[in-house]
Image (cartoon, grey):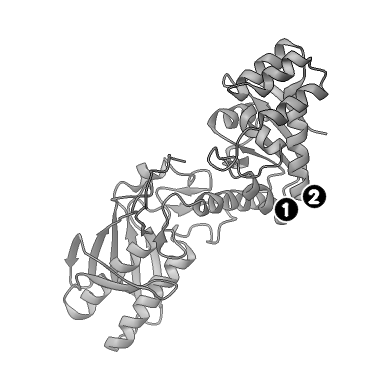
């Protein structure tokens, strides 16, 4: 996750909110011959918000409107992306249907809240678009049978920076949002991605998955166990989010992989491993070193160490299995959250992807 800037942060709008506003403007033009600009929509919790149009085009039986997404101060990959909605007349009685245009992905794996083959337009944005179509249809005496195509030019390249490929969403981005509002640097979107990864893995019959704190440990654990891409869960700092969801949606075996510093926090009982919310406890580590038979000088050197890496190096020179002990304690923390049903292994890697600690019970 990118470093959060100082000061009050500006909120933004989800792709789902932008797609809904573009849909409303396009459908209104199809009904009246004119595009409302700005166009106003209702968010899921009832707030009314307005969006300015970036593009519009009216044809004989279709209309297109586009909005530039403003994600506020969040480092969102879709910030400033063009969200386009093309609304066409549908078959009588067909209701509202959805189509993936350029840059919007298609679901190819089970486990997501959308069927395989469906455009990656999530349930809440679909409900928002259906609602806005129903409102306009009632206002103008129309049946509301329309086909909505959502497009994001350049979306396939943007999607390469997301977890979509691992979740089986191919060809572009997902249209997301549960509230319509982007809260800068929110943990919610990352945890939602972890949950989707678990759902997709379970639906695919994965029995052994790995949650990693970063790209180095992920590549190392994938090589260690020859895991398929679908079995890799982008845990990041959110060990608690991963473990709590697995408690209720278990997979037979979980490997937790990471660097020593992150997993030392987990070993000490922390479930949020972010540096801003938990710290390596060097006094606690000194106690572990003492338990392993470290002499007084090493214990004091551990207590005064500058980095966790320094502690690992000192313990290794002294022949102490510190990595294994930290892995074992991190495993105990994980098992305590999972409360049974999942076999757990913890592996610790250094920056060169060398295995420096392991516990599998």
Local packing at callout 1 (Cα closer than 10 Å; few below 14, some 14-19, many 20+) is: some
Q: Indicate the quadrant where residue 238 lies.
A: top right
Q: Residue at x 18, y 64 (%)?
A: 56
Side (left or right) of 315 relative to 33 = right
Side (left or right) of 68 relative to 223 = left
Q: Which residue is mark 2?
A: 341
Percent from the top left, x then y, of residue 341?
80, 50
Q: Indicate the quadrant where residue 359 lies.
A: top right
For the residue labelled by badge 2, is the local secondary structure a helix, a strand or a loop? loop
Q: Indicate the quadrant where residue 261 lies.
A: top right
In the displayed structure, would residue 351 be above or below residue 160?
above
In the displayed structure, would residue 87 be above or below residue 291?
below
Local packing at callout 2 (Cα closer than 10 Å; few below 14, some 14-19, many 20+) is: some
Q: Residue furthest top?
A: 317
Percent from the top left, x then y, of residue 159?
40, 45
Q: Earlier in the sequence, mark 2 or mark 1?
A: 1
Residue nearer the viewer, 149 or 272:
272
Residue nearer the viewer, 307 or 120:
307
Marker disc for residue 247:
1
Q: Residue at x 38, y 49 (%)?
A: 74
Percent from the top left, x then y, of residue 179?
44, 65
Locate the C terminus by quadrant.
top right
**Disc 2 to disc 1, C-alpha distance:** 8 Å
Side (left or right) of 87 relative to 197 = left
For the residue labelled by badge 1, is the local secondary structure a helix, a strand or a loop? helix
Residue nearer the viewer, 56 or 95:
56
Q: Residue at x 37, y 52 (%)?
A: 8
Does residue 145 appear anywhere in the picture?
Answer: no
Mark 2 and mark 1 in contact? Answer it, CB < 8 Å.
yes
């Amino acid at each position: 996750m990118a470093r959060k800037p100082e000061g009050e942060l500006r909120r933004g709008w989800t792709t789902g909110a932008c797609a809904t506003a573009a849909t409303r403007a396009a459908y209104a033009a199809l009904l009246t011959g004119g595009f409302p600009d700005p166009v106003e929509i209702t968010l899921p919790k009832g707030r009314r918000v307005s969006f300015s149009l970036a593009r519009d085009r009216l044809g004989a039986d279709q209309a297109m409107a586009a909005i530039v997404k403003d994600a506020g101060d969040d480092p969102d990959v879709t910030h400033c992306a063009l969200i386009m909605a093309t609304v066409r007349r549908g078959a009588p009685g067909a209701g509202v249907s959805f189509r993936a245009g350029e840059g919007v992905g298609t679901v190819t794996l089970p486990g997501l809240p959308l069927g395989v083959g469906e455009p990656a337009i999530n349930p809440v944005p679909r409900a928002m678009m259906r609602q806005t179509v129903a409102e306009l249809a009632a206002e103008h005496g129309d049946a509301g049978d329309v086909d909505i195509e959502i497009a994001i030019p350049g979306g396939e390249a943007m999607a390469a920076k997301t977890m979509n490929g691992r979740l089986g969403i191919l060809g572009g981005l997902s249209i997301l949002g549960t509230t319509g509002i982007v809260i800068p640097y929110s943990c919610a979107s990352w945890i939602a991605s972890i949950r989707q990864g678990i759902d997709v893995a379970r639906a695919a019959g994965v029995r052994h998955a790995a949650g990693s704190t970063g790209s180095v440990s992920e590549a190392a654990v994938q090589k260690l166990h020859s895991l398929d891409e679908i079995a890799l869960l982008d845990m990041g700092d959110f060990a608690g989010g991963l473990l709590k969801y697995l408690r209720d949606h278990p997979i037979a075996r979980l490997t937790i992989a990471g660097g020593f510093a992150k997993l030392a926090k987990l070993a000490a009982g922390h479930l949020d491993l972010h540096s801003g919310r938990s710290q390596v406890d060097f006094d606690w580590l000194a106690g572990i070193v003492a338990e392993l038979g470290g002499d007084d000088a090493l214990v004091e050197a551990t207590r005064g160490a500058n980095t966790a890496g320094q502690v690992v190096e000192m313990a290794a020179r002294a022949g102490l299995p510190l990595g294994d002990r930290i892995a074992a304690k991190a495993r105990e923390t994980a098992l305590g959250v999972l409360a049974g049903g999942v076999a757990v292994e913890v592996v610790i890697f250094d920056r060169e992807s060398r295995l420096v600690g392991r516990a599998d019970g």
